[in-house]
Image (cartoon, rainbow, N blue to C red):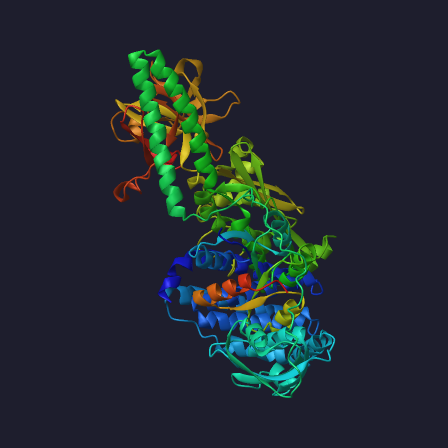
Amino acid sequence: MSKTVLVVDDAAFMRMMIRDILAKEGYVIHEAVNGRDAVEKYDEIRPDLVTMDITMPEMDGIEALRSIRERDPNARVLMVSAMGQQKMIVEALEAGALDFLVKPFQPTKVLETVKKCLQLQAG
Amino acid sequence: MSDMDQYKDIFLSESAEFLQGITDGLLALESNPTDLEPVEVVFRGAHSLKGMSAAMGYDLTADLTHKMESLMDRVRKRERVADPPLVDLMLDATDLLRALIDAESSGGSNPDTTATISRLVAMAEEEGNAAISDADAGGQADDRSNAAVLDDRADATVFRVKVTLEDACVLKSVRAYMVIKRLSHMGTVVDTVPPARELEDEQFDRDFEIIVSTPADATTIEKAVMAVSEVHAVTSELVDETDEDLPGEEPAEEGAPRRPAIPKLSETQTVRIAIGHLDTMVNLVGELVIIRSRLERVASDLDSRDLEDTIEVLHRVAGELQHEVMHTRMVPVGNIFNRFPRAVRDLARDLGRSVDFSMSGLDIELDRTVLDEIGDPILHLLRNSVDHGIEPAEDRMAAGKDPKGTVHLDASRERDQVRISVSDDGRGMDVARVWGKACDLGLAHAESRDSYSDDDILLFTCVPGFSTAAQATRVSGRGVGMDVVKGKIEHLGGTLQINTAPGQGTEFVLTLPLTLAIIQALLVGARGQVFAMPLSAVDEVMSPDEVQLDTVDSAPVVVLRDGTIAPVYPLDALLGVGGQMLRDPQEGEHIVLTDTGGQKRALLVEEMLGRREIVIKPLSRMFRNVRGLGGATVLGDGNVALILDPRTMFPSREEVL
């Protein structure tokens, strides 16, 4: 069965890029446009993996990560960040994120990391 | 990065949204510098644009947005206030950013960013140093990771774990942190080489070592480290001798993973469509509407009940399709209104006026084509209000008004029209002065004052060459004026109205059709040809024997019920297809009373062919500027009818006489 990925980013551009990269490999993609949306969609979809942007309106990625991990301690969340957000990535990893990607990214890197996250047990 | 071209459209449309968000946020900050919400909006906008442009390979854009983000980050952290110099610099940077995105996306020559970037950097570095708080955070995180260590067990052994990261690894310090965190789940991290502080500061190349005390075996350790992304290689060696009999246990799983429920499709999904596709769809639906009327004609000739019933269904379906397609072309007026706050602000600043600008009805929707055209006219009206309407603060105080003037832009829906108003609480317009000037310019006779309403008189300001401003200013006087505004609005099938109260303010009201592509029209015939007259310009249709005729200056006029007069124009003569211009209506002719911006005229036509919904097709380039014609349409019988343009088809009285 193909894996379900919830792509969370406030920029449609970024969602589209990640979606294209993953959909080509057979992942089933859902999208959320901010942290709050992500938490709601997570409950609804229960995806195998979430790719989570950090800087977003409504609720930021770290808050959303916490909220999702509270609801589902096994939730697999992959952070998507920009350069210069070390501090927040560390915070996210502390809060249970599995891994992170730094924008801009290569498609191969995204696939590799997503695959890795799906193999990892949720920490 | 040519494979990125497919993302260019969405990049451009979305970056325009972010640019707007940044601009709005900065303006909000300007009026309320302590509000943190707009700070977040501006910060996030710059941040998102940074990521997007880096992905597109637009390095200059990424760099500029990075600097903007850094400066806003200081404001977020309350290390700097959003004072006017900051807002000004950020607005400048936003303008530059817009130009830069244009240039980088189109391959044009890039504007020079060095000056703005160094100003941004200089301002971000003023007072205090932002880097300190980052370093602190790193140390804190490390402490926490050490605190997460499991109980040290007696049977643990100590390993020296050598880790090599991938060449292309970004944020090496975080990768190192992840490795340490993973190992600390398995035992106690005793030491690192280089020391933790240097790892945090990325003071290492690709290799680092971790000394860990753990009950786990080498394979388990290596597997755990390799599971971290961007780790190129790992080796582990035993540091001291202790018994290794107990295999390490992976941290227990917290409950079995739950299977995801079958995902539901989310209710509303949106798709971005290039406007060209929509235009094509509108054209195709137009064709469908035409074929439908042809079928209706055929059916009535054949007198087939079945066919008529089927066409009835087709009629409904085509109608709904048309409605839906037209709906997809509707865009909220906010999309163009959102550039006005900045423009009004700049203008008020240039003129030294203090103006409170507000907008409402931003979600009212208009056809894209209409919307694209009204931006400039509205901007002109806003300029007018700020420049001529709002008085200088001292005059306002002398008049007992708030020294700060208000200008309001509103949109509202009225049946199948949209009403847009620009109102100010300024000095108002002087009707007597406008009237005086109209008489001086020969636009009206002083003795006929009673036949004009105040509203009519105010519209004289829209006659080319008419301006009551004492002198043209940089802002309002550019050779274009109210005449251009009125022309544009009328070209779009709308009307302009001016309301004013001396000393209290002025309101300009634009009434616009929702859409341009399909209109209701009256089909009329002259000399065997069919013409379509937009119904929006038609007041009523009369027969010559039910109206009172008179002559003014030897030209025939129709005297209307309210006593006003409408000059008579025969359609055939107007179009130059025969007939006398100055003649009375004849037996069998029809009078179509037209109203364009309050001007009434009686159009004489030979035939009345009824009312029809028509699809406007633009005329070919050759005919585009022919006076009196606004396009063409295909009729139910397949014949083409020219669409009359009531705003340009009538010559002035002087031209006729």
Percent across and percent down for residue B315 are: 40, 24
Percent across and percent down for residue B579 are: 27, 24
Percent across and percent down for residue B209 are: 58, 85
Q: Is residue A12 or residue B189 the one in the foreground?
A: B189
Q: Is residue B183 or residue B418 the one in the foreground?
A: B183
- Residue at 42% x, 56% y is A24
- Residue at 71% x, 71% y is B78
Q: Inspect this view and state whether residue B628 appears.
A: no
Q: Quadrant of the N terminus of chain B?
A: bottom left
Q: Is residue B309 or residue A1 the one in the foreground?
A: A1
- Residue at 50% x, 60% y is A14
Q: Is residue B229 above or below residue B461?
A: below
Q: Is residue A75 above or below residue B180?
A: above
Q: Is residue B258 above or below residue A108?
A: above
Q: Quadrant of the C terminus of chain B?
A: top left
- Residue at 52% x, 56% y is B17
Percent across and percent down for residue B373 are: 45, 47
Position of residue B242 in the picture relative to residue B613 (left or right): right
Q: Is residue B620 above or below residue B210?
A: above
Q: Inspect this view and state whether residue B258 appears.
A: yes
Total marks shown come to 0
Q: Is residue B119 or residue B342 the one in the foreground?
A: B119
Position of residue B492 in the picture relative to residue B216 (left or right): left
